[in-house]
Image (cartoon, grey):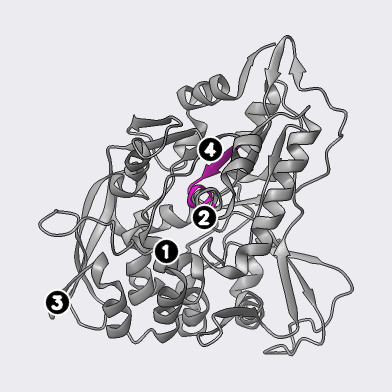
């Protein structure tokens, strides 16, 4: 797979949108003699739909609205073609922008805007999540015992700004538990949703709460050690990828964030995506990523030097990225401590597909790609990151099951029949 294609796959295989409704507290959890244990799904990066509310907003141009009486769905765009008109694109990027105060370690939305995930509770989304959930509906699940937990994907689990979203997740787990006859809940995370859940379980939720409310944590294609693609994206920008950063619309997703990149001046939104804590947090962690002489240790090379994960901060300094540098320093110190999740865990991932691991730049400005190298992975995330869950096997008494699947891609995992059967065996049992 070509370098640029891998990047597009990394971004778009994570896309979905979600629409939710509230459960019927009297719903049955048994169908045809089979108990269907409750499930909550946390989707991947860029996968939660977002809503915006405007109040005395000062737009960058006349094509943006200033006020709205209600919450308006705006991500993903209803008509991606509209983003090809530069003024509309400017409005869109201004909506998504996060300002960062490195003294107070606070992220704030653009003045005059409020943003939140669309609806909270049901799994009824579009694209890959909807297809995944449909298979559970076909065996008897309803929106009472299979739920969804969208989140603001610009942020990251390590950021204090996410505490209110973890409070929402806590409430959703407890509500789902009660609505299903006091049945403990399976948390299923796909891609970025897995480290999102992991951080919640290992750093936020008390053990006695987990013992009562969580039946298991199921990780599908979880990038627990991030990805070198994030480091390359941070310093090189999306323009270095031949097919564009977030690329063209993917069929069935409702469109992509960035369309026809070559027609848009990238400098207008470089700082926007570089200041997303989620992308900063996907840079491989300094302590746990392999070190030399491992063949996967070097992430980026220039004529001047090699950069390993241990050199993340120096990499950001050399790229003159002050915002991401302080985001990394202030929010990811505990990224180098990885206690076990404290629940039963099932860690499923694909391997055997060439996956980007390192990039050699021909210049010191991170703009001209000379060469790149691949390692085994799922086409988006390397095995080094995917299999990190094995480290917790002997760190807790509760079992952790690691299930690698040969030649199954990042998103292909959730459509694979063998994987689905494994999930059904976990989440259902005879009455």
Other residues around mark 3 within 10 Å, as few (<14) / some (14–19) / many (≥20):
few
The residue at the point 14 percent across, 54 percent down is: 294
The foreground one among 299 and 170 is: 170
Residue 202: percent from left, percent from top? 50, 50
Q: Are marks 2 and 1 in contact (CB under 8 Å)?
A: yes
Whether residue 183 sits left or right of residue 320 in the image: it is: right
Left or right of 5 on screen, residue 423: right
Mark 4 to mark 1: distance in Å? Answer: 21 Å
Earlier sequence position, callout 3 versus callout 2: 2
Which mark is drawn over residue 203? Answer: 2
- Residue under label 3, please give it: 305
**In the figure, residue 335 lies in which quadrant?**
bottom left
Query: Which element type, helix, strand or loop, lies under badge 2?
Result: helix
Q: Quadrant of the C terminus?
A: top right
- The correct choice, above or below, for 117 with respect to 198 in the image is below
**Residue with the mark numbered 4:** 217
Q: Which residues are magenta?
A: 187-196
Image quadrant where residue 118 sits: bottom right
Residue 52: where, in percent of width, then height? 75, 70
Above or below, comparing residue 184 to residue 245 in the picture: above
Q: CA distance from mark 4 to mark 2?
A: 14 Å
Q: Which residue is mark 1?
A: 334
Of labels 4 and 3, the one closer to you: 4
User: Image check: 200 left or right of 306?
Assistant: right
The earlier-in-sequence mark between 4 and 1 is 4
Please tell me whether residue 192 belongs to the stretch shown in magenta: yes
* Mark 3 vs 2: CB contact within 8 A: no
Judge the density around disc 4: few (<14), some (14-19), many (≥20) Cα neighbours within 10 Å.
Answer: many
Q: State the image coordinates of residue 86 (x, y, percent, origin top left).
A: 60, 81
């Amino acid at each position: 797979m070509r370098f640029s294609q891998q990047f597009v796959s990394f971004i778009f295989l994570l896309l979905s949108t979600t629409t939710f409704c509230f459960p019927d507290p009297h719903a049955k959890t048994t169908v045809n003699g089979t108990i269907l244990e409750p499930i909550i799904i946390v989707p991947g990066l860029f996968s939660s739909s977002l809503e915006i509310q405007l109040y005395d907003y000062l737009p960058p141009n006349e094509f943006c609205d200033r006020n709205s009486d209600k919450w308006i769905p705006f991500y993903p765009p209803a008509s991606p073609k509209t983003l090809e008109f530069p003024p509309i694109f400017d409005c869109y990027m201004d909506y998504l922008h996060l300002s960062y105060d490195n003294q107070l370690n606070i992220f704030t939305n653009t003045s005059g805007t409020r943003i939140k995930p669309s609806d909270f509770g049901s799994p009824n989304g579009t694209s890959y999540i909807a297809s995944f959930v449909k298979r559970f509906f076909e065996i008897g699940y309803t929106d009472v015992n299979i739920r969804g937990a969208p989140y603001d994907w610009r942020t990251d689990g390590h950021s204090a700004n996410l505490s209110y979203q973890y409070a929402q997740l806590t409430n959703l787990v407890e509500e789902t538990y009660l609505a299903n006859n006091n049945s403990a809940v399976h948390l299923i995370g796909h891609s970025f949703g897995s480290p999102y859940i992991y951080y919640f379980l290992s750093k936020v939720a008390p053990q006695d709460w987990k013992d009562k409310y969580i039946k298991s944590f199921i990780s599908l294609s979880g990038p627990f050690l991030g990805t070198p693609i994030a480091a390359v994206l941070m310093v090189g920008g999306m323009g270095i990828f031949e097919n564009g950063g977030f690329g063209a619309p993917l069929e069935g997703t409702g469109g992509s964030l960035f369309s026809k990149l070559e027609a848009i001046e990238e400098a207008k939104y470089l700082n926007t995506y570089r200041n997303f804590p989620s992308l900063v947090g996907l840079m491989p962690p300094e302590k746990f990523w392999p070190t030399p002489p491992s063949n996967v240790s070097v992430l980026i090379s220039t004529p001047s030097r090699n950069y390993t994960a241990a050199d993340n901060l120096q990499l950001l300094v050399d790229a003159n990225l002050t915002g991401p540098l302080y985001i990394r320093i202030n929010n990811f110190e505990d990224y180098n401590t990885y206690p076990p999740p404290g629940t039963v865990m099932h860690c499923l991932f694909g391997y055997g597909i060439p996956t980007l691991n390192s990039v050699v730049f021909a210049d010191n400005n991170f703009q001209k790609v000379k060469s790149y190298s691949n390692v085994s992975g799922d086409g988006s995330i390397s095995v080094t990151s995917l299999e990190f869950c094995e480290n917790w096997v002997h760190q807790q008494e509760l079992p952790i099951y690691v299930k690698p699947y040969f030649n199954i891609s990042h998103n292909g995992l959730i459509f694979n029949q063998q994987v689905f059967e494994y999930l059904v065996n976990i989440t259902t049992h005879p009455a």
